[in-house]
């Protein structure tokens, strides 16, 4: 066999093994707090109900339940035991400004979650601010509302990956 062909085969096998290992290794996701009982999710218009249902159901399948999902009047105060969802692009940009390189927007914040945790480690309430309706971003931010942080050294596609989350990976949650 040609040395170049053998080198190509070895490179492909090593790369494939690396990808497989990344998908099979245990992922340790930091968790900063837990809810004492399932929280109530309240959302403000224009949150898309189908996107919200998809995100809530994804978390529910792995054991993170919420009590009820209901509309809430805009800008009402958040109560203890509640996750509040708001679409507020100006506030998201203010809190997590986009990075511009060579005239193109690179990354930036699609969502921000503020979670209030008591001294006992129990989450009291959370507010999710979204730039726009997007079910994956909403599901990722719900993860923060459930107390999860961004795991280090995790492959793309994990729900809590800091920049490239996905629906297919929930290890460690």
Image: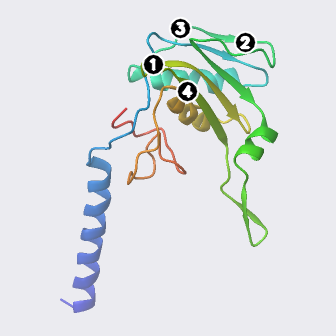
Position of 27 with respect to 47 (left or right) is: left
Image spot of residue 7 (x, y percent): 25, 84
- The residue that disc 4 covers is 55
Q: Nearer the viewer, mark 3 or mark 4?
A: 3
Crowding near pointer 4: few (<14 within 10 Å), some, many (20+)?
Answer: many
Q: Which mark is residue 67?
A: 3
Q: Nearer the viewer, mark 2 or mark 4?
A: 2
Is residue 26 shown above or below 52?
Answer: below
Is residue 35 shown above or below 128?
Answer: above
Q: Nearer the viewer, mark 4 or mark 1?
A: 1
Kindly state the secondary structure of the residue where label 3 is placed.
Answer: loop
Q: Nearer the viewer, mark 2 or mark 1?
A: 1
**85 and 46: which is toward the camera:** 85
CB atoms at circles 4 and 1 under 8 Å apart? no
Image spot of residue 45 (x, y percent): 78, 21
Q: Which mark is residue 122?
A: 1
Crowding near pointer 2: few (<14 within 10 Å), some, many (20+)?
Answer: some
Residue 142 in which image quadrant: top right
Q: Which mark is residue 89?
A: none
Q: Nearer the viewer, mark 1 or mark 3?
A: 1
Mark earlier in primary sequence (1, 3): 3
- The residue that disc 2 covers is 71
Q: Residue at x 25, y 77 (%)?
A: 9
Q: Residue at x 78, y 38 (%)?
A: 91
Kindly state the secondary structure of the residue where label 2 is placed.
Answer: strand
């Amino acid at each position: 066999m040609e040395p170049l062909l053998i080198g190509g085969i070895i490179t492909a096998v090593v790369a494939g093994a690396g990808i497989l290992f990344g998908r099979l290794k245990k992922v340790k996701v930091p968790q900063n707090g837990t809810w004492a009982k399932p929280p109530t999710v309240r959302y403000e218009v224009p949150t898309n109900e189908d996107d919200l249902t998809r995100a809530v159901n994804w978390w529910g399948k792995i054991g993170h339940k919420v009590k009820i999902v209901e509309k809430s009047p805009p800008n009402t105060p958040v109560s203890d035991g509640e996750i509040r969802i708001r679409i507020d692009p100006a506030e998201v940009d203010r809190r997590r400004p986009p990075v511009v390189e060579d005239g193109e927007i690179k990354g930036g914040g699609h969502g921000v979650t503020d979670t209030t945790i008591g001294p006992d480690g129990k989450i009291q309430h959370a507010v999710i601010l979204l730039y726009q309706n997007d079910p994956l971003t909403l599901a990722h931010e719900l993860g923060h509302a459930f107390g999860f942080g961004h795991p280090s050294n995790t492959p793309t596609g994990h729900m809590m990956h800091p920049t490239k989350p996905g629906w297919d990976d929930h290890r460690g949650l």
